[in-house]
Image: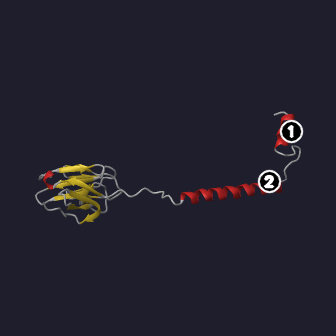
């Protein structure tokens, strides 16, 4: 930028190009701009305040079908819910597939369940055979809706061995 261009710009902004800004003026301007920025960010925060930043909770309840859909020996895994549904002579049960150690997803084996992350092993009822898991897999409540479909409530744990009698 040439000297003429600098003088033209300085005239338009009403600034003397030869005058240097003092430290006191610089600090005053810096403080003023910092205060203005703080107020602007506060105003933005206040405008966002009425709108919730969290999404509504996803329901822990889900339908699994009618009791007649589950014949004795049926094993059905709901991968999106990390739940396994088993049917035996006594009834239908819903068990979590989330390891109680650090939350890995266990896999079904011939002797029960195995955690691929840290080696925990569970029997067919979800009880710990080998650690480091501190407790058995969670069992969930199953109830029947008025229309006849079964509802699993993954938010309600029940004692190990609790089954929905068919």
Q: In front: 146, or 39?
A: 146
Viewport quadrant of the N terminus: top right
Q: Residue at x 14, y 59 (%)?
A: 91
Residue 57 image position (x, y, % from top left): 38, 58
Mark 2 crowdedness (10 Å alpha carbons): few <14, some 14-19, many ≥20: few
Decide if residue 70 is on the left or right side of residue 140. Answer: left
Mark 1 crowdedness (10 Å alpha carbons): few <14, some 14-19, many ≥20: some
Find disc 1 in the rendering and name its residue.
7
Is residue 46 in view from this perspective?
Answer: yes
Q: Residue at x 85, y 53 (%)?
A: 22
**Which residue lies most toward the top here?**
2
Q: In front: 84, or 20?
A: 20
Q: Residue 96 carries which label?
A: none
Q: Which residue is drawn at 84% across and 33% down?
A: 2
Residue 120 image position (x, y, % from top left): 29, 55
Q: Residue at x 74, y 57 (%)?
A: 32
**Which residue lies most toward the right here?**
18
Q: Looking at the image, what colour scheme do you see?
A: secondary structure
Label 2's element? helix
- What distance separates the C-alpha of mark 2 from that of mark 1? 21 Å
Q: Residue 26 carries which label?
A: 2
Decide if residue 124 is on the left or right side of residue 45. Answer: left
Say which label, 2 or 1, has the lower sequence index.
1
Which of labels 2 and 1 is toward the front?
Answer: 1
Q: In front: 126, or 24?
A: 24
Dividing the picture into quadrants, the one containing residue 25 is bottom right
Q: Are marks 2 and 1 in contact (CB under 8 Å)?
A: no
Viewport quadrant of the C terminus: bottom left
Is residue 137 in view from this perspective?
Answer: no
Label 1's element? helix
Dividing the picture into quadrants, the one containing residue 143 is bottom left
Decide if residue 10 is on the left or right side of residue 64. Answer: right
């Amino acid at each position: 930028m040439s000297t003429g261009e600098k003088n033209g710009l300085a005239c338009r902004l009403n600034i003397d190009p030869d005058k240097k800004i003092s430290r006191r003026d610089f600090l005053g301007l810096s403080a003023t701009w910092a205060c203005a920025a703080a107020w602007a960010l506060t105003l933005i925060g206040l405008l966002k305040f009425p709108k919730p930043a969290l999404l509504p909770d996803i329901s822990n309840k889900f339908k699994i079908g009618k009791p007649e859909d589950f014949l004795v020996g049926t094993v059905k895994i709901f991968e999106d819910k990390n739940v396994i549904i088993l049917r035996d002579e006594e009834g239908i049960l819903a068990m979590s597939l989330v390891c109680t150690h650090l939350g890995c997803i266990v896999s079904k084996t011939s002797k029960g369940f195995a955690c691929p992350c840290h080696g925990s092993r569970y029997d067919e009822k979800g009880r710990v055979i080998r650690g480091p898991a501190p407790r058995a897999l969670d069992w969930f409540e199953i109830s029947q809706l008025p229309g006849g479909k079964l509802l699993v409530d993954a938010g309600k744990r029940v004692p190990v061995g609790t089954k929905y009698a068919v």
